[in-house]
Amino acid sequence: MNKYKNVIVGVALVGLIAMSVFAYKVYSTFFSANTNFDTQTYEVFIPSTADYNAAFMLVADAVDDRDAFHETAVRKGYNSNIKPGRYILKKGMSNNDIINTIRSQNQPVKVRFNNQERLEDLAGRLAQQVEPDSLTLLKVMKDPAFLKEHGFTEETALTMYMPNSYDCYWNTSAVKLRDKMLSAYENFWNEDRLAKAKKIDLTPQEVYTLASIVQKETAKADERPRVAGVYMNRLNRGIKLDADPTVIYAKKLKEKDFSQTIKRVLYVDLTIDSPYNTYKYSSLPPGPIVTPDLNAIDAVLNYEKHGYYYFVANVENFGYHKFAKTLSQHNVNAAAYRRWVSRQGINR
C-alpha cells in the first residue's frame, strides 16, 4: 500500500513540477520584460497596409526575445487583427503590455506647418508627419469638386490652411486630414473676424492673401499692423501694391523653381508678366504667396490707421522698416537702403 502511495505522491510531485515549469514559461512569455532599447520610450509606426509579418518586423527591433513576442501575439489573436497607427512602447514592457499597446493605444501626432508657399510645399510638409504621401495629399487638396463646394479655386486653395498645431492620428487618411483643416478654417473665421473682413471690404481669402504679403515683408509681429495699413491705404486708393515679395513669387513661378533664395529684386524682375507681380498689376494677386502666421491675418483685420504709403527696410534697426507718407521721402529712404545692400555685396 505504501508502495502505491509513494508512486501516487511521486506522480503528483512530477505533475506539480511540470505545471510549475509550464506556468513559469507562460509567465515569462507573457509578463517578463522584453524590450531591448535604452531610451525610456520607443515609437512604432504600423502602416495601414501592414499584415502581421510587416507589423511583427516593425516591433521585433524593439524586443529581446522575438519568439516569445510571436507566441504572445498568436495567443492573444493579434496576428489576425492588425491595428495601424503610431504606438509608444515603454522600456521594460512585457509582451502582454506590448500587444495591448499596439492593438488599442494609437497615439496622436502633432501636425505643424507654417510659411509654405504652395500647396505642393504644404503637401510635402504634411507628408513628413502623417502616413499619406505628398501626392495623395496634393490630389485631395486640389480636388475640383471639393474646392468648388467650399468656394475655393486652385489659386485660393492655400487660404484654407491655417498654420497651427493640430492633433491627429498618424494613419489618418488624406481626406480626413484635409477636412480637419477645413474645420479649423471655419472655426478661425468666426463672426467677429468675418465682420472685420466685411468692414474693410475684403473676403476671408483676400485677407489671407494680403496677410501672406505682410508675412513676407516683416517677421516682426508688432510691425505687421503698420505694414498692413500701408497696403490697405494703397488698395483703398487704387494704387498698385508694389510689393517685392510678390515679384519674387512671380519669378519663382515663372522659372518653376521655388527652391531659389532671392534677397534682392532687380528692375528687370518688375517687368515679369504675372498676375502675382503687383508692380505690374493692380489690386491683390489671385492667391496667397505663403501660408501666413495667424497674427499676420489678424494684423490685416486690425490694421493700423495712418497716412503711410511707402516703406523700406531700416538698416539702422534690422528687421524693422522706415515708413514714409510721400514718394520723395520714400526715395530718400530707399536710396539709403540700396547703398547699404550694395556695400554688403548682395546682388541677388
Image (cartoon, grey):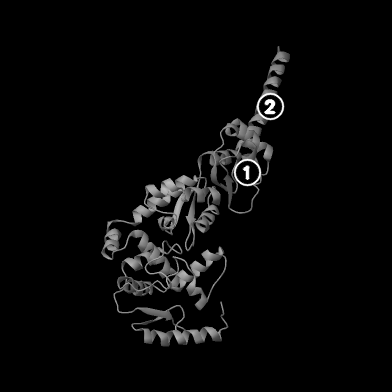
Query: Label 1: which residue?
Result: 59
Of 292 and 148, the residue lying toward us = 148
Q: Secondary structure at mark 1?
A: helix
Q: Residue at x 45, y 77 (%)?
A: 319
Whether residues under marks 2 and 1 lie with C-beta atoms below 8 angstroms apart, the answer is: no
Of 37 and 252, the residue lying toward us = 252
Q: For the residue marked with disc 2, what is the amino acid? A: Ala
- Drawn side of residue 293 relative to residue 131, left or right: left
- The residue most toward the right is 3
Choose top left, top right, bottom left or bottom right for residue 8. top right
The percent coordinates of residue 48 (x first, y second) are: 56, 41
Relative to residue 9, is residue 167 depicted above or below?
A: below
The percent coordinates of residue 120 (x first, y second) are: 52, 56
**Structural distance between the alpha carbons of marks 2 and 1:** 32 Å
- Quarter containing the C terminus: bottom right
Rendered image: mark on residue 18 = 2
